[in-house]
Amino acid sequence: MSKYKNLLLFLLILLGCVCVALNLSADDATNSELTQNALVYVIDIRTEIGGGVSTYVKKGIQKAEQANADAIVFDIDTPGGKVDSAVNIIRSIQATKVPTIAFVNRQAISAGAMISAACDQIVMTSGAAIGDSAPVDAQGQEAPEKIVTYIRTTIRSTAERQNRNPDIAEAMVDKRLFLVRLENGDIIKLRPIEFINEQDAGTQMEILCAEGELLTLTTVEALDYGFVNTQAEYLSELLTQYRIVEIEQDYSENVITALTQKDVLSQQEERRKNRVSLIKTLENAKVERFEVTVADRTVFFLTSPYISALLLSLGGLGLLVEIRTPGFGIPGFLGLLFIGLFFGGHMLNQVSLWVVMLIFVLGLALIVVEVFVIPGFGFTGIIGLCLMLGSVFYTFFSETGDFSVALFWLSVSIILTSALAILATIFLPKSSPFQRFALSTVMSADQGYHSAGIDDFQSFVGKTGVALTPLRPSGTARIENKRLDVVTVGNFINENTPIKVLEVEGSKISVETLEE
């Protein structure tokens, strides 16, 4: 009997050893599976946010999706930028199923804070800052309430989507709020009247951000308030902390996201361990950086509002100089080049803008016809000018999404073009480059040169005739059976209208309508 007991005990011990070995083998296989084949895409947002950055980020996300990346890390260091471009980036981030991590590598201010809040996770380096998302207009002044409300709602809903405290996000936009921490640790926003009522009621509160201030958080504060997830100094340190997990949902599709090891354990305790499955660790993952190409940097540069306005003004100046000079030369070529760069840069962001460029070209053609074919400046020229200005306005509007901002940059372009034209008129004829092309020889009378018939026109002063063509203001008239080029001194004169010569200056014959 003792022999059977010993045999049974031996078999149980052997079975236990086998189970332990199998379990260790399974754990090794699981760990091996977790660490292999992880792929991370890094997309830089390290400049002022505009239409070019929005297009670049969208292409980067698409590239990561095509490569079946396990996570996307946005390397952020930006002072902010255009709100509409930031909103487009947020929508691209929210549309992807690839887990996203915002790596605030020094600063995420204004639009940068909004983009960070849209990501699944936020990681900050030491000494970094995030916040101050209040919108301002093109002059740097506080935006009207309508825009503030839109931004406040956008950043609040973005924070709610990622289970972040929306009151903290809202305090980054609206300076009319108090952000306070209650005794139980909850951080909430209060309107001024609500804050006063709570004070009168004796509620113990720590003021984190007072009325009249915009919330901007340091790394320590953001971690303390629970607005960001962790801290890392380098990308490699960030990846070491993160795991890709699948969280089982009750009534919707399972969610694949990135979590720190601490958050993984917290989720497993909250949802039961079998509902949070580890997929991969990002430690030692293959990193692919979506490089900012020369073409991307060119688009960033050309679509900057300041550069766009300058290109448009230089292009307009070149075309004005070309119209006022015979033939086609360097000013016309440079004018078309600058206009092409203006529309080309924006077309790289929105391909559909080629139609707008065609409208601009049509307007320019109408003005050329008005100047060189039809005397004076009338309906055709006005239509052409409206088409040109309208196409430019729409281009600015498509980038900013704000009517007043688009109108401001259009006005800046017009004023700058006018100023450059005046300066060119005053100083260009005196410049040495211009003198090389200008004829400086004077054909004076003492050298034997005589103008043809200047004094002959003096005899027509006071004479009457009839307009052979519409005079607006220049045209042709018949005076004493001679066809003469004349110009009006008043309003438009219709064809076949009796006229009278008012004065003669050299070969310029000024006429007015002959009153009965």
Image (cartoon, rainbow, N blue to C red):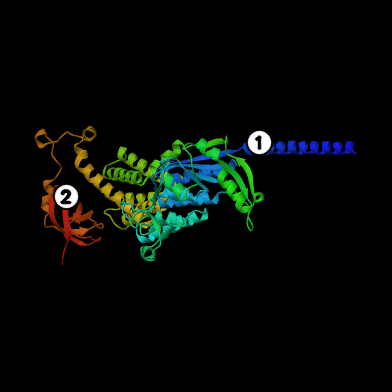
In the figure, 202 relative to 419: above or below?
A: below
Q: Residues within 10 Å of mark 1 (few under 14, many from 20)?
A: few
Q: Residues within 10 Å of mark 2 (few under 14, many from 20)?
A: some
Q: Residue at x 27, y 50 (%)?
A: 415
| Label annotation for residue 508 | 2
**Between 127 and 154, the one nearer to me in the picture:** 127
Quadrant in the picture for the N terminus: top right
Helix, strand or loop at label 1? It is: helix
Residue projecting furthest to the bottom: 516
| Label annotation for residue 32 | 1
**Measured from the top left, where is residue 246 in percent x and y?**
62, 48
Q: Residue at x 36, y 61 (%)?
A: 145
Q: Residue at x 32, y 53 (%)?
A: 408
Q: Is residue 257 something that shows in the picture? A: no
Q: Quadrant of residue 501?
A: bottom left
Helix, strand or loop at label 2? It is: strand
**Measured from the top left, where is residue 33 in percent x and y?**
66, 38
**Between 299 and 110, the one nearer to me in the picture:** 110
**Measured from the top left, where is residue 215 in percent x and y?**
38, 52
Q: Is residue 230 something that shows in the picture? A: yes
Quadrant in the picture for the C terminus: bottom left
| Label annotation for residue 226 | none
Q: Amino acid under label 2? A: Lys
**Measured from the top left, where is residue 361 in percent x and y?**
38, 49
**Between 29 and 456, the one nearer to me in the picture:** 29
